[in-house]
Image (cartoon, helix red, strand yellow):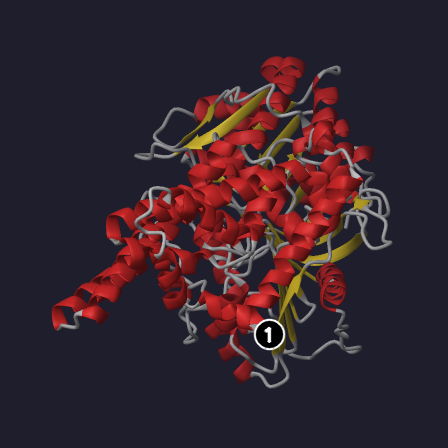
Amino acid sequence: MSDLPPSHPGLALQPGRNCWRAVHADRFRLLIDADEYFRAVRQAIANASESVFIVGWNVDSSLTWPRQATGDGLPARCADFLHAVAAARPALRIYVLAWDFSMLYAMDREWRPVYELGWRRHRRIVVGLDGRHPPGASQHQKIVVVDDRLAFVGGIDLASACWDEPAHLADDPRRRDPDGHPLPPVHNVQAMFDGAAARAVGRLARERWRRATGRLVHRRRRPSAAGDPWPAAWGPDVADVKLGIARTEPAHASRNGVAEILQAHDDAFGAARHTIYIESQYFTSAAAGAALAGRLAGAEPPETVVVSRDAGSGWLEHGHVALLRTRLHARLAAAGGDRYRLCCVRLPGQPAALDIHSKLAIVDDDWLCVGSANLSNRSLALDTECSVILAAEGDPRVRAAIAGMRNRLLAEHLGCDADAVARATRGGLLAGIDVLSGGERTLVSFEPPAGADGVVPGAESEPEKPLAPDELVRRFVPAEHRRPARLRYAALALVLLLIASTALLWRWTPLGDYLDVGVLARTVRRFSQQPITPLVVMGGYVAAGLLSIPITILIVVTGVVFGAFKGGLYALAGTLASAAVTYAIGRWLGRETVRRLAGRRINDLSRRLARRGLVAMVILRLLPVAPFTIVNIIAGASQISVRDYLLGTLIGMGPGIVVTVLFAHNLASAMRNPSPGAFGVVALVAVALIGISVGLQRLFVARDKVPGHG
């Protein structure tokens, strides 16, 4: 490597400051888009002889490699492929570590039972889930290490939703989720490198495995004599270089926090002289934004181009994330004027801009950073991240390679070749983009929408440091809802004691005999002809809610006694009345009381309800995670609005209640007057009940799709 001094002192690798390790790599290549990465990592894993570590925000066992990537005779599906590789190499051990994800992202992930079933059991393939992080944080690294000799680090998970190729064709039949549904075009990048840098990332992966699972995986003392795992189809962009391995790790479990990735960006942005090129899925970081704004406001500001998505893809991004980006953009535009530009990529024949998922920054052709960390508050402070930094430090070979990688990225976005980008940008980065823009596929500058400014309080909605549970409540719950009160604590304790003891009585004493449908039906019939019948029925539902009697039993009894029409009305009214009363109890008790006494699982439920409103309420009614009464009390304590609460209950439970009443009524009629036709009606109603349940789940799960901040 050249002994020339660094071009910019601020762009030098400084272990302990802006990186964890500064280590040598024999070869380095930037893989652009997941098709290239998936094919390269598949070849590398197929070449493995000792160990494979796969660490991700999401690792999808059902990922299926496109046909052109599977010419090795091995299965196309990820889990089957890994099993086949392990079976062919008796010394190989494979470790898969994915984030033990929050319910906030449950609709985008394999649920744990499916996940474990998908991976099946193999004594040399071990699957772990990583939950070793503070509340609200995630394991967000995207790392694959093969034999501690080859590493992949970037923004791409081994998951179906990540696949695409540089053409980004509309309706590409290969771009599908495991259920066959089409996915939008997506752009991403991943670094591939070997040498001592790969060994360092292997050490990082082992340490993450140890923290997450409590099990230590030792590395062989002597390097293997096996063949080179580097995939032969891909040559390096540059050889014989020094790489910085940088991390974000939040303070947790007596460990200090690490913010090397943020420091690296601060140093690089502050040292920039000519150009800054950024690709980031999220562009919201207050700290990195301050460094950029400071440099843009200084003397001779660098030309700065940020390539991002033009709009969010779900409720989370359309809300506070989009607003934070709007605020940051306004600050940078004011500081940089015409030296700063926020762009998106327009594709031919597609109404939406390209989904930018990459996390990359290039400064002055001297410094390149690629990894899992977005330029967002959480990626630079709260989540667990890993990025690699290629710094030229005076070496013209490396500067030329970094420039070439930037030109390849711009060429993809502008629909031309890298040589054309190199020629056009000789007079300046922004001028070159203007010359090459205007085709069917092009970069366009845009102004992000103003959004709901004034509604979101600022960076608090995307924290810059881990928050303790008490701090979460302090920030997001108004003071009047946080007043501790001994009376409320005592009341909640009594309510919980009543619910628990009543449930035990129903289960273990003769009192449970009264829950027999026949006994209840005979009891209700005594009041069925009275003028006050509606009030009696609704009072019965309210009492059942307070006594933790399963509400489904009352719905069945109502259908048997009152028939399809009247029974349906009574069941709907009674369920809503019971829900309203127990909701009011939760509202009176208050969130602080529930938070202190109800436990972690209930607190998680409360946060989801408060943050997601109507859709969360519908899903909880369709997929209950706690008893009816408990959900109602927590909903009241979480401050979900009465409208969202009752409407969500009606949407989530109403169709099921109606069909259950019909089923009970027709079943009772068939039992009294048995005939093939009567039982046929019962069967049809049962099929309808199942169909409505599945249909509603699919509808609201689809509506509730949350963008993976991965």
Q: Position of residue 194 (x, y in %)?
A: 67, 61
Q: Position of residue 565 (x, y in %)?
A: 25, 48
Residue that appears at 50% across and 53% down: 544
Residue that appears at 65% across and 16% down: 336
Residue that appears at 26% across and 65% down: 668
Determine the image quadrant of residue 683.
Answer: bottom left
The residue furthest bottom is 90
Question: As displayed, is residue 248 above or below residue 9?
Answer: below
State how many labels appear.
Answer: 1
With 463 as the anchor, is 157 left or right in this view? left
Q: Position of residue 327 (x, y in %)?
A: 62, 21
Q: Secondary structure at mark 1?
A: loop
Is residue 131 visible to us here?
yes
Q: Nearer the viewer, residue 347 or 677?
A: 677
Q: Which residue is mark 1?
A: 48
Determine the image quadrant of residue 466.
Answer: top right
For disc 1, the neighbor class at 10 Å (few under 14, some 14 to 19, many from 20) is many
